[in-house]
Image (spheres, rainbow, N blue to C red):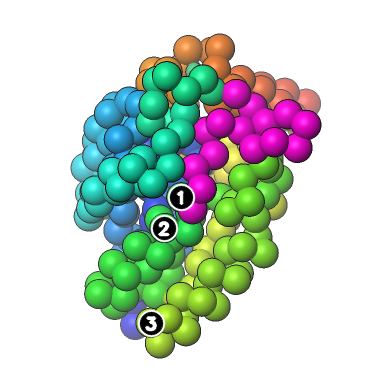
Amino acid sequence: MSKAALVVFSGGQDSTTCLFWAMKNFDKVEAITFNYNQRHKQEIECATNIAQEWNIPHMVIDMSLLNQLAPNALTRSDIEIKTGENGQLPTTFVDGRNLLFLSFAAVVAKQKGISHIVTGVCETDFSGYPDCRDVFVKSLNVTLNLAMDYRFIIDTPLMWIDKADTWELADQLGRLEYVQQHTLTCYNGIIGAGCGECPACKLRSAGLKKYLEKKEATQ
Ligand SMILES: [Zn+2]
């Protein structure tokens, strides 16, 4: 029996690495992207282009209601991007985002007869997002199984690794350069190396530097 997976896919470093991870571990891979009026429509284009390039069946779901529910810095340019300080959540946090994304992904996966859902959430670089935690994902997994009387398995290959290890994983999968050049993590919408200034770019480049230094040292 062929094993299939549905990847929650944004076209960023993490979910693109997950896409390649899934392509290695499953016979059949599909991707789902959520359009919630991100500041940069490049994100949707980027995800669509990557999926096309690798012949991955790709669905873009309209989730603009998310911004209606919870205006946030990812969708509204009048809200400044700030990292969380003094125990506050960062302004890029969107209440319920992963809850909704994973739940919608599960509905789609079941219709396609797919039981594995792959997501790039990570507890290690925990930016203060409660719905990126392992305990949340496990709890939701149980809830989804009960809600739809179906045996979902939510795979989180990045849960316990940091950004440097995520680059290492991309490298092990033979896709380091591809991820470097074709993915979009930057909050200013610049594909590849990004703007270099925003928190996402800083995290991404610090991780890459750390990994490349480690690689250098072990060679
Ligand atoms: Zn940036």
- The residue positioned 65% from the left and 60% from the top of the image is 134
Name the side, left or right, on which 217 lies relative to 163.
right
Q: Which region of the structure is painted magenta?
A: 82-96
From this viewpoint, which residue is outermost toward the bottom?
Answer: 149
Q: Residue at x 53, y 33 (%)?
A: 92
Which comes sooner in the sequence, label 3 or label 1?
1
The amino acid sitting under disc 1 is Arg
Instruction: Name the chief secondary structure element in magenta.
Output: loop
Name the kind of residue labelled 2 in the image: Leu
Tell whether label 2 touches label 1 (CB within 8 Å). yes
Relative placement, left or right, of 41 versus 187 is: left
Answer left or right for 207 relative to 190. Answer: right
Distance, label 3 to label 2, CA atoms, is: 15 Å
Image quadrant holding the N terminus, namely bottom left
Q: Which residue is mark 1?
A: 97
Q: Residue 96: x and y, percent? A: 49, 53
- The answer to whether 214 appears left or right of 179 in the picture is right
Name the image quarter holding residue 53: top left
* Residue receiving disc 3: 148
Residue 27 seen from this side? no
x 75%, y 37%: residue: 87
Label 1 residue SS: helix
Would you name the residue on which mark 2 appears? 100
